[in-house]
Amino acid sequence: MRELAGSWLSGPTSSGNEPEQDFKGERLGLPEYGEGSLAPLGVRLGALLVDWFLAYGFVGLVVSLGGPGLLGGETFSAVASWATPLLWGVTGVVCVWLFAQTPGQALFGIGTARIDADERVGVLRAIVRVVFVFFLLPPLVQDEDGRGLHDRATGTALIRTR
């Protein structure tokens, strides 16, 4: 099992021979500043909150325009509890797959990029990222580059686009 998951679950090497990096993302071949550099945690969190509130607002708009009859009399809070995360997840997968960034990421000038190849993220990696982020803990467990488990598992990073 370790061989299968070692690329993203392995801890620090026992030899300690790896050179220190001067900035986050250096080992990944990313620049220190500007376009293509790793996005800081605050910017990533801001983009996530924008995406979440967009999903919440859209669900609220649909429920208010449709009225209680639209959903069989269910209240907004009952619908929002399942519809908001569903819409957030679908939006995240589709936008990262097609555009390499969600609306919140676009607003903050960041995007999702593969670090293992010069290719698009792809639908499977986008699905895995959204599932991991949904559970909140994987993005909080970060490596020395500031990438969460969801990024390490999918070979991606959130980088600045401008």
Image (cartoon, rainbow, N blue to C red):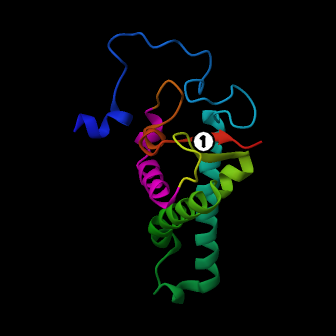
Of residues 162 and 68, which is closer to you in this image?
Answer: 162
- Left or right, 96 with respect to 130, comes to right
Give the percent coordinates (x, y) of residue 87. 53, 67
| Picture coordinates of residue 74, whole percent (x, y) | 46, 79
Mark 1 sits on what residue? 158
Q: Which residues are magenta?
A: 122-141
Q: Residue at x 56, y 60 (%)?
A: 97
The relative height of residue 99 versus residue 4 in the rendered view (above or below) is below
Give the quadrant of the N terminus: top left
Eyeballing the image, is 48 above or below 141? Answer: below
Is residue 61 or residue 111 the one in the foreground? Answer: 111
Q: Position of residue 38 (x, y in %)?
A: 63, 34
Q: Amino acid at mark 1?
A: Leu
Which residue shows up at 43% across the image and 33% down it?
Answer: 141
Residue in the picture at 51% in, 34% down? 147
Determine the image quadrant of residue 110: top right
Q: Is residue 38 magenta?
A: no
The spot of residue 56 in percent (x, y) is 59, 64
Quadrant of the drawing holding the C terminus: top right
- Horizontally, is 14 left or right of 141 in the view? left
Residue 16 in the image: above or below residue 7: above
Which residue lies most toward the front here? 118
Is residue 126 located in the magenta-colored stretch of the structure? yes
Disc 1 on helix, strand or loop? strand
Foreground residue, 91 or 118?
118
**In this rendering, would 75 be left or right of 103?**
left
